[in-house]
Structures are given as structure tokens and as C-alpha cells.
């Protein structure tokens, strides 16, 4: 967002408290959502739970067209519609909820760097194995599937990933996980005792790769070889998502399968 | 030769100047000339045949030459009638640029009349603009001998922006249409498959409109019946028009599923002093099938300089945060009194293009809960009626459109409707309350 738009949103956002009926929109779980979208949505849900802000999850087939930026997930809070983790973090900060207030500037810069790393490596690794089915009727489902395929291919070309073989993708993911594992060490969260948006983002991506039923599990195996990352994911799942595990309503939360 | 009423026999009817047109097509149009009994009859029937040839849309010029017959088998009272035709060029093109509403575009048009020799017509229009591009390809084929029975195939992409709903829509579609007359009525059967893409026009669009964004596919069969015996479409002085249209979507594929009915009725009557009283009534309802809610692109809209005057364009009825969402049922009625301009300036010339009119418009638009009975529906449509009255000046533009400048007083305004008192609007010949 531009600076002026950010300032404007902050001012409007600060005026009202977080409402009870805030809703997060994502594509349909069964046959539509892409791996990367699932990870982004989970990251946002984890972040909001860490901030203790209630949100309902609603699955819509046209979620990506409803979003103002074209990206999912997006949240509808009061009159505002905000999409993607970065702007949502800003938005909640304007309302007075923040997880990274306790960090100093060096740590904050470090956090941003790691978030970029995760976005570049893990997000694009997820994109390289997409799923192209569609809830629309024929011939619209074919047309939209081709469009999506073409878009993804163009994106991969733009970031130079088109030429990468599957082996190289796995290598990159492995390196990323190694960096994360080293930074995490034996701490419970990346910045010691308190979770931050980096924890939410890493959890979203790693958990999605570990529990997806779609891919061939090579990516999952790579992550499992780092035991502290696996423990990290379990810990966050237990702390923030377990309360809805028993007796979850269909609108409650949509994590899907569990690590247990 | 005796008088013009003496008996004659038409021996030959020729057509000269044909190039690519096939002769069997024209046989039907000119066959009646053979039945003429005397010279006056020959002239009348030749004139009618000339009109019929011109309406095929394949000739630039048709001239009639009537002469006594000569040759070995010539009768003393025999006549030969010759139609001298000039065919249209195989390909005509046009190029325009248009500027308006923050957008400039160039429009390219190509027309091929009489492609295969039997009055088939192929037209292509392509518009390339700074914001959007759109195109349309159309193929028209009449039945030889029965021009009013014809088939049209269309392929198109159009984009529209609807600021009253903060909505923009891109339609890509294909349609086939069959027209045929039946006794005194005209029928049209049409199948249309459209891929619709809806989006928000601005970031400030309401959430209700945002929820409708995305792609839908509509595959619909529709039938229209119309009877029109007005003497003109723009300033009719007498006659009536009745048009009933139904559309069924969802049974031939696609994800939009509904039954839509609407009708249009207009009656005109001439009164003293060259003034005309005109009454019109419209109505329609949309019934979603299969439990899915209706889409904003299928609903009805009401209000504006061509429907209920005095209200903003399509700004009546259900709305959310200033965006009008349309309704599933509506009715609208209008009563007009057209008179010539006071003191009749420019009579016989320019002044005849103008008329003053006094009008009364009313209408209502709402959503129906189809679980309730028809009585509840009628009650819902009868309460909170919007209406307006006023006067203004109307100008006729050729035979295609009319321009109005009115002063209106809107009444029965409900909360959420937008209204204004002066309205200025043009209208085509098809939909005008």
C-alpha cells in the first residue's frame, strides 16, 4: 500500500475495536485451494489466534476475485477489507494489537529478512506443484484452469524458477529449512519466549507442506529431518489450534488434518 | 394499346445486373408480378417487388423498366418487366474513433453483405480502447423466399461499467437466434452461452457487491413474442406494442439457474389538436431455481431518464452502502400526453421534430421471498410505490432515438433511492416508459 493509503487505513482502523463478526475468506478447501494459498491462510489464522483476536473462516469459490488485491486470504473487519499477511499485521497494529512490539530494531530487521526468505523459498516451492481443478461448470473450469496455469508459469519465469528442476527446488527448500532451524535452535519461538508474525508465517508454510495429501512427500521429508522445526509446528498447533479440535464447528477453523 | 385498364399479360420478368447473387433467391420476391392483370396493377406489383428486393439488404439500387415484349413469342398485349439492380460491394469497412468518459477508443467495422449469394450477411466490429477492448462477430442468414424467417449467429465480448452498482462486467458469449413470424406475431427463439466476469469498479464498493465478484457461466434459452402495429417506433401516433419475453437458464449447462419473465405493453391513441396519449406498462420477475441466490447481473433495475423519471439511473430499490443491487421483481407504468410545441414554431419543418410532453411515471422494485404466496408478493409490490410527474420537451433523432429535457417532481421516494428534478436523457427506440 502507498504511504498515504496506509496512514488513511490506520486512522480509520484505530477508531474501532475488533468486532465479534470478523471473517476471513479463503477458497474452497476441497477442490480449489492451492498449496500456497492454504499456507498463507493458515499463517494469517495462526497470527490472529496468537493476538487473541476472534475470526470466523468462510470458504468461498470466488474468494480470490472478492479480494481487493486479488490475493487470498483476506479479512472483512467492520467496514474494512484487508488482504495478505503483511497488510493484516499493519491493520491489527493500528488497532493496538501487535506481537512484535517487544523487538528492537535489529531484531525487527532480522524478522523481516527471515519472512522474505520464507516467502521466496517455501512459497515458490509450493507453487511449483499446483493443483488445477475448479468448482465451475464446463467449459469455464477448463478455461480458468488454463489461465491459472499460464499465470503461474509466467510468475515462475519472472523469478527465474522456470528452469529449475525438481531436485534444485528440493535443495533450495532444504537450505531454507536449515537456516530456519539454525535460527530457532532450542528456543520455543524464533524470538525466544513470545511468538511473532514470523512464527505464524513459518508455521503456516511448514504445516501445510507437512500435512498436504497432494504432493509426493519429498518436501515433507526434508522438513521432518529437522526435528526442532517439527517440534515447533506441533507446539504451535497444540497451543493455538487445539481448543477447537474437540467439537469444532464448521465455521470455527479450517486447519484440516493434524500432525498428531 | 388501349387504356391503362386494358388487359395485359406479363410475359417476362428479368433481373439484370446480378453478380454473385443467386437467382433462385430472387424468384420468390418477383413472382407476384406475373399475376398482374392491367397496367396499373403491373406498376403497383412492380413497386412492391422493388421494395421486397431492397429489404434483402443486398442491393444498393433497384430500378424498374416496363416495356412491351418483343421477340418471336411476343403477344400483342404482352409486357416485359426488367429490374435493373446494382449489387452492394463485397466488403465495406468503417473506422471511427470515440472519446468519452475518461476513455478513448478506436472502432473498426467490417461488413460483408451477401456473402454466399443468398442474402447472408457477415459483420464484424472491433473496439480497442484505453481501458477495455470489445468485439462482435455476427452472421445473418434469411430463409430464401421468406426473409422474415432468419437465423443469426453471434460471437461477442463486451464490457460494461455500472457506477450505480460500483460494478464492472465483462461478457464473452456466443448466441444463436431464430426469428419467425406466426400469424400476426413475431417470435424469436434464442440460445445464449455467456461467460460473465464481475468485478468491483472501485475499492470503495460495498461488500455485497464484492461478494458477487468472480466468474459465472450462463447458458440460457429464451423466447420472445412481440406484436407491434404502431405507425412509428419513436413518436407513435396510434397502435400498440406487446412484447413478452421468457428466459430459462441452467438446464443447458452453466451455473446460473433461473426462470425470468418480463413484458412490455404500450398503447397510443390520437386525441384532438394533434396530441397523442400514450400509456405503457412494464413488469417482470426472476425466479431462482435450485436454491442458489440470483446474481446481480441477472436482476432487474429501475429508475432513470428512460424509466421512472426523476430518479437516478437505476437507483431505485435494494441497495447496500450506496450501491444498487437490483431486484427480483418489478413493475413500472407511464402515462404521457404529447402535444406539438406551444404556438407551433417552425411548423412543417424543424418544429415537427419537437414535442412537449406531460408525464406521470410510477414503479416499484423489490426482492420477493418465493416461499410466501402470490398475495403477499402483490402486496409487497404495491407498497412503497415510487412515482413522479412533470413536463418537458422531446426531440426526435431520425428514426433511431429521442432526446428529452424534463422537469420532474419525484414522489414516494424511499430511503436509499437517489432522485433529481431535472433529467436529460436520450433513449433508443426499444425501451422507453
Image: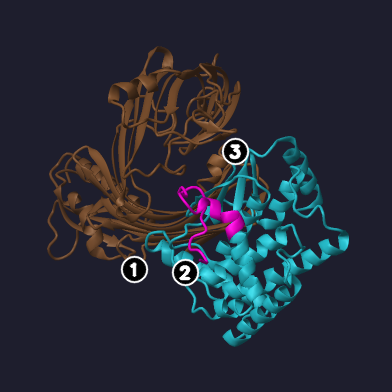
Chain colours: A cyan, B brown
- Observer-side mark, 1 or 2, equals 2
Q: Please check whether the numbered discs 1 and 2 fall on a single chain.
A: no
In the depicted view, which residue is nearer to us: B215 or B38? B215
- Observer-side mark, 1 or 3, equals 3
- Residue B141 picture location, percent across and down: 31, 58
Relative to B12, is B161 above or below?
above
User: SS at mark 3?
Assistant: loop
- For label 1, the residue is B20
Q: Residue at x 54, y 42 (%)?
A: B209
In the depicted view, which residue is nearer to us: A43 or B381? A43
Relative to A23, is B389 above or below?
above
Question: What stretch of residues is rendered in magenta?
Answer: A238-260
Let me know if residue B161 appears in the view. no
Protein chain holding label 3: A
- Residue A22 picture location, percent across and down: 59, 42
Relative to B55, is B304 above or below?
above
User: SS at mark 2?
Assistant: loop
The local crowd at label 3, few if under 14, some if 14 to 19, many if 20 or more residues have their Cα within 10 Å, is few
**Mark 1 in CB contact with mark 3 (< 8 angstroms):** no
Residue A189, picture quadrant: bottom right
**What number is the disc on residue B211?**
none
For the image shown, how many numbered marks are present on the structure? 3
- For label 3, the residue is A20
Amino acid at each position: 500500500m502507498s504511504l498515504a493509503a496506509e496512514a488513511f487505513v490506520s486512522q480509520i482502523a484505530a477508531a474501532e475495536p475488533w468486532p465479534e463478526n470478523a471473517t476471513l475468506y479463503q477458497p474452497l478447501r476441497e477442490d480449489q485451494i492451492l498449496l500456497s494459498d492454504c499456507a498463507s491462510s493458515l499463517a494469517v489464522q495462526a497470527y490472529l489466534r496468537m493476538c487473541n483476536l476472534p475470526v470466523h473462516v468462510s470458504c468461498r469459490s470466488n474468494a480470490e476475485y472478492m479480494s481487493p488485491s486479488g490475493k487470498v486470504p483476506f479479512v472483512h473487519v467492520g467496514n474494512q477489507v484487508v488482504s495478505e499477511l503483511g497488510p493484516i499485521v499493519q491493520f491489527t497494529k493500528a488497532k493496538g494489537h501487535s506481537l512484535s512490539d517487544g523487538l528492537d530494531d535489529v531484531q525487527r530487521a532480522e524478522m523481516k529478512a527471515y519472512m522474505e526468505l520464507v516467502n521466496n523459498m517455501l512459497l515458490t516451492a509450493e507453487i511449483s506443484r499446483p493443483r488445477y481443478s475448479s468448482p465451475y461448470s464446463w467449459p469455464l473450469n477448463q478455461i480458468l484452469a488454463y489461465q491459472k496455469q499460464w499465470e503461474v508459469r509466467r510468475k515462475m519465469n519472472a523469478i527465474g524458477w522456470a528452469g529449475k528442476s525438481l531436485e534444485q527446488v528440493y535443495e533450495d527448500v532444504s537450505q531454507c529449512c536449515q537456516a530456519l532451524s539454525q535460527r530457532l535452535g532450542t528456543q520455543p519461538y524464533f524470538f525466544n519466549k513470545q511468538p511473532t508474525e514470523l512464527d505464524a508465517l513459518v508455521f503456516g508454510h511448514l504445516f501445510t507442506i507437512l500435512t498436504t495429501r497432494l504432493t509426493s512427500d519429498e518436501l515433507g521429508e526434508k522438513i521432518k529431518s529437522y526435528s526442532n522445526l517439527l517440534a515447533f509446528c506441533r507446539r504451535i498447533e497444540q497451543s493455538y489450534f487445539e481448543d477447537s479440535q474437540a467439537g469444532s464447528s464448521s465455521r470455527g477453523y479450517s486447519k484440516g488434518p493434524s500432525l498428531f | 394499346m388501349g387504356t391503362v385498364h386494358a388487359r395485359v399479360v406479363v410475359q417476362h420478368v428479368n433481373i439484370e445486373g446480378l453478380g454473385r447473387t443467386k437467382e433462385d433467391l430472387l424468384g420468390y420476391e418477383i413472382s407476384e408480378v406475373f399475376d398482374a392483370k392491367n397496367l396499373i396493377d403491373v406498376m403497383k406489383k412492380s413497386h412492391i417487388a422493388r421494395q421486397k428486393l431492397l429489404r434483402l439488404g443486398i442491393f444498393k439500387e433497384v430500378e424498374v423498366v416496363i416495356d412491351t415484349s418483343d421477340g418471336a413469342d411476343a403477344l400483342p398485349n404482352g409486357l416485359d418487366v426488367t429490374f435493373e439492380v446494382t449489387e452492394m460491394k463485397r466488403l465495406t469497412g468503417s473506422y471511427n474513433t470515440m472519446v468519452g468518459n475518461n476513455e478513448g477508443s478506436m472502432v473498426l467495422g467490417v461488413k460483408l453483405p451477401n456473402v454466399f449469394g443468398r442474402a447472408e450477411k457477415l459483420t464484424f466490429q472491433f473496439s480497442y480502447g484505453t481501458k477495455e477492448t470489445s468485439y462482435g462477430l455476427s452472421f445473418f442468414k434469411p430463409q430464401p423466399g421468406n426473409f422474415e424467417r432468419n437465423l443469426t449467429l453471434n460471437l461477442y465480448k463486451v464490457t460494461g461499467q455500472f457506477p450505480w452498482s460500483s460494478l464492472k462486467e465483462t461478457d464473452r458469449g456466443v448466441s444463436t437466434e431464430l426469428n419467425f413470424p406466426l400469424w400476426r406475431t413475431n417470435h424469436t427463439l434464442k440460445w445464449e452461452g455467456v461467460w460473465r466476469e464481475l468485478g468491483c469498479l472501485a475499492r470503495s464498493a460495498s461488500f455485497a457487491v464484492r461478494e458477487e465478484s468472480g466468474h459465472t457461466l450462463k447458458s440460457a434459452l429464451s423466447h420472445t413474442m412481440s406484436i407491434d402495429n404502431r405507425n412509428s417506433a419513436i413518436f407513435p401516433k396510434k397502435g400498440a406494442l406487446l412484447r413478452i419475453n421468457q428466459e430459462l437458464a441452467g438446464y443447458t449447462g452453466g451455473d446460473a439457474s433461473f426462470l425470468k419473465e418480463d413484458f412490455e405493453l404500450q398503447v397510443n391513441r390520437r386525441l384532438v389538436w394533434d396530441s397523442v396519449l400514450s400509456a405503457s406498462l412494464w413488469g417482470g420477475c426472476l425466479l431462482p431455481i435450485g436454491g442458489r441466490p440470483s446474481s446481480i447481473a441477472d436482476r432487474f433495475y429501475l429508475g432513470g431518464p428512460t424509466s421512472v423519471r426523476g430518479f437516478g439511473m437505476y437507483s431505485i430499490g435494494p441497495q447496500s452502502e450506496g450501491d444498487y443491487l437490483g431486484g427480483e421483481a418489478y413493475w413500472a407504468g407511464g402515462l404521457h400526453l404529447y402535444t406539438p410545441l406551444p404556438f407551433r414554431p417552425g411548423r412543417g419543418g424543424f418544429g415537427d421534430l419537437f414535442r412537449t410532453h406531460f408525464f406521470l411515471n410510477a414503479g416499484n422494485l423489490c426482492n420477493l421471498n418465493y416461499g410466501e404466496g402470490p398475495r403477499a408478493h402483490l402486496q409487497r409490490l404495491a407498497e412503497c410505490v415510487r412515482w413522479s410527474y412533470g413536463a418537458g420537451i422531446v426531440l426526435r433523432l431520425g428514426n433511431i432515438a429521442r432526446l428529452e429535457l424534463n422537469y420532474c417532481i419525484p414522489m414516494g421516494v424511499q430511503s436509499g433511492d437517489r432522485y433529481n428534478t431535472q433529467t436529460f436523457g436520450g433513449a433508443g427506440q426499444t425501451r422507453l416508459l
